[in-house]
């Protein structure tokens, strides 16, 4: 097998194999690029209501908690050890890992916060940001090396005027101008 | 065809090996090195005494930065207290659904001076997120706060 054939095989099979992961990084990259405009990971839900003043601000009673939860139409049970007093004016009841009620004892309001993972995007960003660590790091490294090989082998797919020493090389150089300009201007 | 089969088989084996190493705990940074923890309440009495010292603290996650996962607030061992663990954007990304989980963190206390203008901006953002009203005139001056900069964090189910 000659070098040219190996080059084509590397480009073709790595391209096939990493098609899915490339889509993951594309979609997630686009989502994470606009962090200032939206939250790509979570959908935040809030509902605020007025409540009766808490009688004993040092220790909220179980009955008072239940009354507040009912107002939010929450009928699930809560654990006493999930009631916290994080500051002078707030009491926090943790219902689930993504759901809590914050009581403001100063202005007598309660806020029900519910955070849900944004479908699809949360999972894709989870991979992109390498939140997993562990062996995903190696897999992502393997992808990075493969991406380099796909790019490099792509440069040698065509011979002659269309190839790296002709039109192909010129287009590749043009593509470098923008990132280089941004580094020179803003770095 | 033989090459294609070999590639597909190797890919499956490699992918399975990757899946096998997933852990339940969420860890950030190197392993914890300190065994004895310092109570959050002890730190909050005179935080300036703990600035720069390497400490291990523990608490329950009460709030997390939903936008960038760049901070997590944990409970104190005493009522009416909590402490914020803050990292530079991207250093660690704390999951927003960590609320109620147990957090162990090794790191140090640092001092932050916040200007009046910055407080107004932060409160505006907070009010926007919670769909509440905020009057900038209610902020009269800047303030000094103390936060915890972790280098290792372990988040586990309670």
Image (cartoon, rainbow, N blue to C red):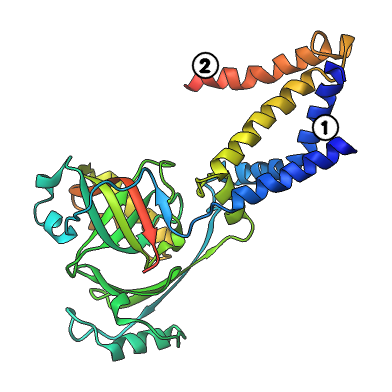
User: Where is residue A103 shown, x and y percent of the image?
Assistant: 31, 75
User: Where is residue A24 shown, x and y percent of the image?
Assistant: 67, 46
Task: Name the element at disc 2.
Answer: helix
Q: Share a chain, discs 1 and 2?
A: yes
Determine crowd level at label 2: few under 14, some 14-19, many 20+ residues with C-alpha closer than 10 A. Answer: few
The image quarter containing residue A71 is bottom left
Q: Which residue is mark 1?
A: A12
User: Where is residue A77 shown, x and y percent of the image?
Assistant: 41, 86
Quadrant location, the N terminus of chain A: top right
Relative to B82, residue A59 above or below: below
Count of numbered tags: 2
Relative to A159, residue A39 above or below: below
Task: Name the element at disc 1.
Answer: helix
Determine crowd level at label 1: few under 14, some 14-19, many 20+ residues with C-alpha closer than 10 A. Answer: some
User: Where is residue B102 shown, x and y percent of the image?
Assistant: 34, 63
Residue drawn at point x = 69 percent, y = 20 percent:
A175
The image quarter containing residue A6 is top right
Relative to A181, residue A101 above or below: below
Please tell me the numbered disc located at residue A184: 2
Residue drawn at point x = 62 percent, y = 48 percent:
B17
């Amino acid at each position: 097998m000659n070098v040219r054939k190996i080059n084509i095989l590397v480009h073709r099979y790595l391209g096939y194999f990493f098609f899915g992961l490339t889509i993951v990084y594309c979609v997630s990259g686009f989502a994470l690029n606009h962090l200032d405009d939206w939250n790509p990971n979570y959908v935040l839900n809030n509902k605020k209501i007025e409540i009766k003043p808490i009688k004993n601000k040092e220790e909220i009673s179980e009955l008072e908690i239940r009354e507040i939860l009912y107002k939010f139409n929450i009928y699930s049970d809560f654990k006493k050890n999930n009631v916290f007093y994080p500051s002078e004016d707030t009491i926090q009841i943790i219902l689930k890992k993504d759901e809590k009620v914050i009581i403001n004892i100063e202005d007598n309001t309660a806020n029900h916060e519910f955070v849900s993972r944004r479908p699809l995007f949360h999972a894709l960003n989870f991979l992109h940001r390498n939140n997993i660590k562990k062996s995903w790091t190696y897999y992502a490294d393997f992808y990075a090396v493969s991406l380099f090989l796909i790019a490099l082998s792509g440069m040698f797919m065509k011979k002659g005027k269309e190839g790296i020493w002709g039109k192909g090389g010129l287009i590749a150089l043009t593509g470098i101008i923008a990132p280089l300009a941004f580094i020179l201007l803003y770095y | 065809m033989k090459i294609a089969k070999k590639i597909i088989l190797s890919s499956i084996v490699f992918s399975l090996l990757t899946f096998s190493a997933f852990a339940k705990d969420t860890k950030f940074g190197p392993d914890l090195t300190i065994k004895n923890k310092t109570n959050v309440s002890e730190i909050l009495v005179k935080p300036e005494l703990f600035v720069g010292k390497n400490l291990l603290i523990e608490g329950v996650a009460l709030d997390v930065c939903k936008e960038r996962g760049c901070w997590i607030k944990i409970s104190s061992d005493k009522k009416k207290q909590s402490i914020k663990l803050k990292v530079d954007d991207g250093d660690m990304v704390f999951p927003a659904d960590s609320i109620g989980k147990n957090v162990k963190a090794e790191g140090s206390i640092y001092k932050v001076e916040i200007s009046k203008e910055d407080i107004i901006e932060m409160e505006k953002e907070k009010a926007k997120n919670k769909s509440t009203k905020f009057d900038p005139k209610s902020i009269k001056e800047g303030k000094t706060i103390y936060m915890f900069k972790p280098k290792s964090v372990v988040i586990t189910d309670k």
